[in-house]
Amino acid sequence: MEKITLKVEERGQCGSGACGRLRKESIIPAVVYGPSGTQNVQVRKADFRTMMLEKGERAALIELHCGSTVKLSLLQASQRNPRTDEYLHIDFKEVDPNKPMVAKVPLKFVGDPVGVKDEGGVLDIARRAVNITCLPKHLPEFIEVNIADLHLEQTIHVRNLPKLEGIEYKTSAGEVVASCVNMEEETEETATAEAGTATSAAPAAEKTDAKPQAEKK
């Protein structure tokens, strides 16, 4: 499959102070870990955002260019500031092009379920990605799930996903991917969940109110 290229640089300084200084200069601290060990690197914020726009939601292999060294990798995780949405740290997982790897691949749902169109049901999507094992060359951008023939009260499990060359599903075969449920049942379940949340929150509120009174004594 097509690879995305990203330029990174060796990062000499570690620690929260050093990482904070890098972020002020629009540089994101990162780590690459895998068969060749752990390497601290850094990437310019603009370069990383450009790569993310190119990658989108699909699964993709990323070629990390660090000087004269090139490492094939997956974007494993990223930390973001919850207030500004700025990237704080990135983890890359190095992969061997000749050995199987584990990757998370998004699911792409296609078709209009007959259970929704003609039977008054509601589509309930339980999973939007699954874990797979494959050689890097077999990594799909996404796994297409045809839901056009999904009737009311029917469910698609991981075991029902398409069989793809060189792909082994690691997510449990019994995991629910999507189902077509009765609209009334969906409404009742939502109401029950909301009621449960309100009930569990009440004791916590009482404890919070009681604490200042105890301190006054």
Image (tube, rainbow, N blue to C red):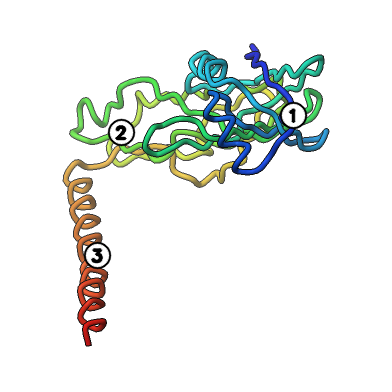
21 left or right of 66? left
Residue beneath disc 2:
151
Q: Identify residue type, mark 3.
A: Ala
Q: In the rendered image, which quarter is residue 45 located in?
A: top right
Q: Position of residue 139 (x, y in %)?
A: 64, 23
Query: What is the spatial separation of the Cα atoms under label 3 and label 2, in whole angstroms?
Result: 37 Å
Most distant residue in the bottom direction:
217
Q: Estimate the spatial distance between the alpha carbons at disc 2 and disc 1, rounded to whole Å.
A: 41 Å
CB under 8 Å between discs 1 and 3: no
**Residue under numbered circle 1:** 95
Q: Residue at x 51, y 47 (%)?
A: 174
**Crowdedness near tag 3: few (<14), some (14–19) or many (≥20) residues, C-alpha within 10 Å:** few
Q: Earlier in the sequence, mark 3 or mark 2?
A: 2
Q: Quick one: 212 or 30, which is closer to the camera?
A: 212
Q: Amino acid at mark 2?
A: His
Q: Residue 51 appears at what percent x and percent y?
A: 55, 16
SS of the residue under disc 2: loop
Residue plotted at (20% across, 32% down): 119
Disc 3 element: helix
Q: Give the vertical position of 39 relative to 50 (above or below).
A: below
Q: Residues within 10 Å of mark 1 (few under 14, many from 20)?
A: many
In the displayed structure image, the side of residue 83 where residue 202 appears, left or right? left
Q: Which mark is residue 108?
A: none
Looking at the image, tell me whether mark 2 or mark 1 is earlier in sequence order.
1
Q: State the residue at coordinates (48%, 19%).
A: 56
Nearer to me, 3 or 51: 51
Q: Secondary structure at mark 1?
A: loop
Measure the alpha-carbon separation of dots 1 and 3. 45 Å
Q: Going by the image, does 177 lie left or right of 34? A: left
- From the image, which quarter does the C terminus lie in? bottom left
Which residue has dot 3 on it? 201
Image height check: is 132 above or below 65? below
